[in-house]
Image: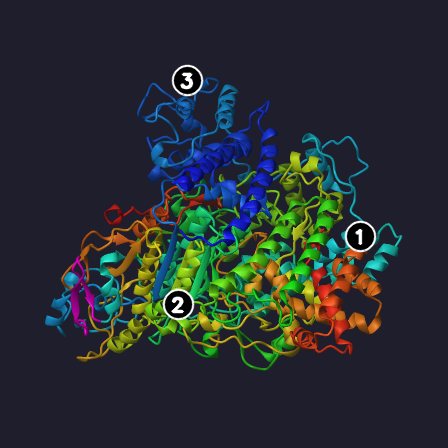
Amino acid sequence: MRISKLKTIIVGFAFLAIAAGYFSCQTATSHQESLPDQVSYNYDIRPILSDKCFNCHGPDANKREAGLRLDIGAEAFKALQEHPTKHAIVPGKPEASELYLRITSKDTGLQMPSIKSRLPRLTQHETDLIKKWIEQGAKYEPHWAFVAPVKPELPKIDDKSWVINELDYFVLAKMQSKGLSPNPIADKERLLKRLYIDLIGLLPNPKETEQFLGNADPKAYEKTIDQLLARPQFGEKMAIGWLDIARYADSHGYQDDNYRSQWPWRDWVIHAFNKNLPYDSFITWQLAGDLLPHATKEQLLATGFNRNHKITEEGGVIDEEYRVQYVDDRTATLGRSLLAMTVECAKCHDHKYDPISQKDYYQLSAFFNSVKEKGLESTVGGPDTWAKHPRMQITQEDLKTTLSFVHALDTNKLEVSVMGDLDTMRKTYVLTRGAYDAKAEEVTASTPISILSFNAQLPANRLGLAKWLFDPKNPLTARVYVNRIWQEFFGRGLVKTVADFGMQGELPTNPALLDWLAVDFREHGWNIKRLVKQMLMSATYQQASNMSKEKLEKDPLNLYLSYAPRLRYPAEIIRDMLLGSSGLLNTSIGGPSVKPYQPPGLWEMATSGRGILKKYVQDTGAALYRRGIYTFIKRTVPPPSMMLFDGSNRDECQVSRYRTNTPLQALIMLNDPTVIEASKALSDQLLMQQKNPKALIETAFQTILCRKPSEQEMTALLSYWDQAKKEWNGKSKEWDKTLAIGAYQPKTKNKLDLVVSMQTIQLMYNMQEAITKT
Amino acid sequence: MEKELLERGLNLNRRKFISKLSLGLGSAALGSLLIPDLFSGSNNLEENIMRGLPHFAPKAKRVIYLFQNGAPSQLETFDYKPLLCQMMGENLPESIRGTQRLTGMSAYQTSFPLVGSYYKFNQHGKSGAWVSELFPHMAGIVDDLCIIKTMHTEAINHDPALTFFQSGAQQGNRPSMGSWVSYGLGTENNNLPAFCVLLSRGKGNGQGVYSKLWTNGFLDSVHQGVQFSSGENPILYLQDPDGMDRVTRRNMLDKIAALNQMEMDAYGDPEIAAKIQQYEMAYRMQTAVPEIMDTSKESESIVKLYGADCLVPGTYAANCLLARKLSENGVRYIQLYHQGWDQHGNLPNEMRGQAMDVDQPSAALIKDLKQRGLLDETLVIWGGEFGRTNYCQGKMQQDNYGRDHHPRCFSIWMAGGGIKPGVVHGETDEFGYNIIKDPVHVHDFQATVLNLLGLDHEKLVYKFQGRRYRLTDLYGNVVNQIIA
């Protein structure tokens, strides 16, 4: 066979990668081998049972084997239906417990998980844990996430010199228990960059850095946070994650994927974060703004949240099939984003792992089942199809008054899809196997009792649902949000599975901290800016990001935060960094989405040929330089540079993004006109002030990386400058071509200087640090 | 053989490695091994483990899927139904239609007049398979093909049907089949993506394609299908900026590496080391891809085989040739989409054009792989997302008619890579409406493709949001009768 010769080149590298990975995994092993003194059901046992046993012996009544259920203690201790003399679990006696005998059995006919289940067998460590747990009495505990959080006492710590606020007590206590100690505080330059990126998604300019460095005020750090929280760019930064959750896009999705005019809702999200709308209102308005007494137009606009899902325009579809699909989408979105429960798993059958029955699912979906909507309202057409009913019109008067945060560019009619229920609620049925036309038992709107029963005093509509969410007894709402905000700044949630707090989700790495934050957030009026500031003020956040070998070995995933995580910027922020640092950025806020540079032909290659989005018509002028959040998202062909940096395709509710590292990303940073134009623009501006290469490099470096270059770095960059000068010297045709990339017209006369400094600057943009929070 | 032994040895190592790993992670199962941030920066580790996971000896190493987007009619391709010509214009008997739901396009028709193929059928090859006169080249290689006449699906509209074929679910952001294969087997050539996508468009009534069809879904985005375009920039952002030569680029890359290394030394973040490697791979890809795209060195016989269009970038013929070259260079999964097969009306005319586009190049691809000794290890698939009705949609004329969507039976073919050649699998009723023998559900088809690649569709799982997901959801049976 003729596999290309190219293949041989990579063998060495592949081998290296294996070796490196092996190293880090081995180290992971050595720390988790020993059994805990006291085995915990929630932390040690339930994850095993859930993953390996609940599939057949869990909450799903229809699929339960041998009548045995292991998710409830009383059931597991009962005599077995098929062997009345035996018990799955006999507390204190593993050797008499059928569960233990089966998981350790050598007999493939008896062995559990059964061969049929195709589940992997338990590891030695797992069986040891179960043995010890049974020996210690097999005590069941309620699932942590279903017990309402109580504010814990601050843990005792040996050394208080490091801590700044309450969060640090919890983090430090955890570190100490793991034999770790915190990193020192990061240097001021890196810290400032981190703050700017986290709060406004833009870099500090060299002047701001200088001022911060020279500021001896002990409160300088805090004051900077306050200033950044007050900037309108804060709303833009915070909105990114919410738009992923809300599956916001500028097209309807599905095959024709024509235009949709939903952007005023996006402007509202930015506005809501900026005016610090408390989280309870933020959610209540989005779920039920239309049902609030004397609802304002702003509250109605907020309900666009539940109309952001895809809507088909494919002629010939069955209306009801799609209408039900939209209801399911809203239900799943509620589950993932607000409850962190995979409720959608109970659409076709009882949930396999969590106590959510199929009936629970349809009771929950009933809240969203009365919208005055159609599955197929219209096929591809003109402005009247850009927002589906129910919808609201935004008038010129609104733009001047109540909806002044909506940035319309012209006086064309502006309509947005919002929520609105029928006068008589639609009946809701359990749908057998989730099929839209297989109606079974009729149900009414309610919530899963395992989370919190629905108070009969509440109206059985979306407003009642919102009140239920913010009932202090609701165990999930506050935890889920503080966890997501933690993820926003620390890269991973205290519960890593931010959309799944159920049995199959991961356990909190620091449960006391999670509960403390959740209760504190609720007690302080669901104040989002306060929550953000609390996290950023902590010593935990302010640590340096150096990773020692010892720390990498003890805690390779940095679960216990003994150093600040180094995180690659989100896709939008990479774009913002390029535009901001090069002075190209157009800082206007809101308005219709824009179409910046994109490789040609992408929309044209993948269109049905219908609608106004069949061709990509690139914007010109200032519209080329808007922030990443405003880049037009056509769902079926999302912007490629965003997708390659793990942006969301907005197909459905997404609560976290990957941070991958691929060669295609390298190609973007090397060849995307956006990067080249930014290099050109920055180079042009610097050359106007400064001809000396060393001084120019220093300023550029400070602009992009927000710190002074080390001597070694400066030497490398200067030598590159000289080398580039030699390479480009005399090649006027070539440099003209390079300089022609991007609309920016440079003013510098000396084109060789321009091209050389441009190359040097692009080199800096390609440093890993340039797109990483450090 | 030596290679297989080596491979098996490596697998043993990988298995040991996995058991160590899962031990270390406590309750972590195989699926959650792939926690992306555990291996952040070095997805290669995941790749290398998974590459070691064929569950049994693979028959095929690579796939080329010639997707006929829009749903070509089975009644004018491979499912010969003379009865429809005899009963031309008569109403489809209710007993045949049964409870089949109809699309919104023909649900309101007052009658369902049967319509026979405008095109003649003949038997070909040793197998005697019936092929319509629209496809003389495919008819010529029919003894290399396994024609499945009994495919059926659950969706009746394009978007959900395509999504179902590619991801195993009609709705939701699930990984596509190519992404699953990339996840399961990794890549044979690290200078090229494991999963490549090539698009072309015929003149017939078209339906869009969408990047969702090659999405990685919840898998790591290294498994995303990479769309190749015609022209100078076959992969997005591949080409150096105008005016820059390779030496200049190389020098910049060396300095980027040097500066990144300084940061690595200071901060110890393994992600930086990975970044340095990714830049090197990007550089090699810049050489490898244009070499493959270059058709100027193709021999006359090859051009003749695929047809002159194969030198016109962006045509189906050019994509077939490119698919062969990518496959030959170790690309695991190559997905072509040819648009224009949605003949609700004007069917005889439009199908002629579509057949002209695809007939010769599809057959050429099989012949070309065969002459290179690659057909045995390359699975080639040809087909659309559902079938078309045996009754006419819209106005019926002797030489002009249309057909609506039909999910209950349709024809595809598979060839090479462990598939029995010269076989016609399954039977439909004489109306070409229902299956009477050996139905193949989309999930069965998917299970079979994975099986041929050495992957057990029930074991190739990924744990996401608490659930182990598979391409075949909870269903699917391998169709053993068509496996050689």
Q: Secondary structure at mark 1?
A: helix
Spot occupied by residue A526 in the image (x, y as percentages of width and height): 65, 52
Q: Nearer the viewer, mark 2 or mark 1?
A: 2
Q: Which mark is residue A96?
A: 3
At label 1, counting other C-alpha atoms closer than 10 Å, the crowd grade (few under 14, some 14-19, many 20 or more) is: few
- Alpha carbon of mark 3 to alpha carbon of mark 1: how far? 68 Å
Q: Amino acid at mark 3?
A: Ala
Which residue is more in the foreground, A471 or A456? A471
Q: Are marks 2 and 1 on the same chain?
A: no
Q: Secondary structure at mark 2?
A: loop
Q: Nearer the viewer, mark 3 or mark 1?
A: 1
Q: Amino acid at mark 2?
A: Ser
- Looking at the image, is A360 positioned above or below residue A549? below
In the image, taking residue B152 as reference, residue A237 lies left or right, namely: right
Q: Which residue is mark 2?
A: B299
In the image, taking residue A123 as reference, residue A218 lies left or right, namely: right
Q: Chain of mark 1?
A: A
Spot occupied by residue A188 in the image (x, y as percentages of width and height): 81, 51
In the image, taking residue B483 as reference, residue B130 lies left or right, namely: left
Spot occupied by residue A123 in the image (x, y as percentages of width and height): 48, 29
- Alpha carbon of mark 2 to alpha carbon of mark 1: how far? 53 Å
Q: Chain of mark 3?
A: A
* Residue at (37% x, 58% y) in the render: B64
The residue most toward the left is B86
Image: magenta residue range:
B114-133
- Looking at the image, is A115 positioned above or below residue A771? above
Q: Which residue is mark 1?
A: A712
